Amino acid sequence: MTDLQGKRVLLTGGAGFLGRVVTGELEARGVGEIIVPRSAKYDLTEQDAVRDLYRDSRPEIVIHLAAEVGGIGANRANPGRYFFANMAMGLHVIEEARANQVEKVVQVGTVCAYPKFATVPFREDDLWSGYPEETNAPYGIAKKSLLVMLQAYREQYGLKGIYLLPVNLYGPGDNFDPESSHVIPALVRKFVTARDQGDPEVVAWGTGSASREFLYVDDAARGIVMATEHYEGQEPVNIGTSHEITIKDLVELIGRLTGYEGTIRWDTTKPDGQPRRKLDTSRARELFGFDAAIGLEEGLRRTISWWEADRND
């Protein structure tokens, strides 16, 4: 077990959507100091900047959340950037953890690392059984390579690193920018705007046949901190709910919860992305007792309420 009481924890991405909630979980554990680097001072894609960060903060625990990521459209527009930025950040963060003899590194990966046609539910042992879905493969492969790096560093240098695979996240504080947001905030914004403007229809991407699994941000943060405390192994661990929903059903549910009364039109010229996503979450349950607590409908209600309040502030 890793006792977080009084420890100095470096939390990359700590000012972001997930990071702010992880910060709250860490504070509840009585950590001594949480270091949240800002990109204006420490560009994590630059090795010298990461070296300076470690020198300045002297962390004992590192939780690496920082990522450059977006929805299908953003991934298609930025494949090179997403590969480089995510690969470079992880490479430097892990290498400097080794050089500074950090007690533990927690690398948060992505469900996008799984093969496009992985057997459902996705089991950690199937991570290498095929190529990821093409639209987000550069991002997914960059993140997956950090699992290999951690395992290699454990073997050669004794660096204790764990690797977590959270499913798609959502919740209050998410990115609602229409150019880079993921599916839930994009749909919430679209339906609330259409409702308020009296638009007769909302256009949704693809056919609606693909399925996804979604994890409320508070559950994700709790799972990450539980793993930080209680998991010591080198094998990757899924963090999710093990419940999937088709995009069609999700779109209709968000339409209902936002009170939108128009019609939904499907733009089938747009990609569906990976056909299905559903995780086997038994490893997290068995190794450190994690189960998701917030159901999708309740989580969506909270997310919609937050967005309706936030956009009017």
Image: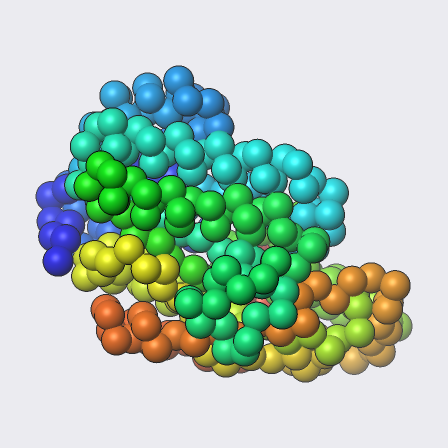
List x then y, in percent, for residue 37: 37, 31
Name above or below for residue 28 compared with residue 213.
above
The answer, for residue 4, to whether it is visible in the render is yes
Q: Residue at (29%, 40%) from the top-left corner?
A: 153
303 horizontally vs 152: left or right? right
Name above or below for residue 87 compared with residue 227.
above
Q: Residue at (34%, 36%) from the top-left corner?
A: 94
Q: Nearest the camera: 33 or 226?
A: 226
List x then y, in percent, for residue 108: 40, 51
List x then y, in percent, for residue 290: 29, 72
Name above or below for residue 157 compared with residue 3.
above
Q: By what rule are the colours in the image chosen?
A: rainbow
31 horizontally vs 132: left or right? left
Q: Quadrant of the N terminus?
A: bottom left
Which image quadrant is residue 52 in?
top left
The answer, for residue 298, to whether it is visible in the render is no
Q: Residue at (48%, 62%) from the top-left corner?
A: 127
Q: Nearest the camera: 295 or 159?
A: 159
Q: Residue at (21%, 57%) from the top-left corner?
A: 232
List x then y, in percent, for residue 125: 42, 67
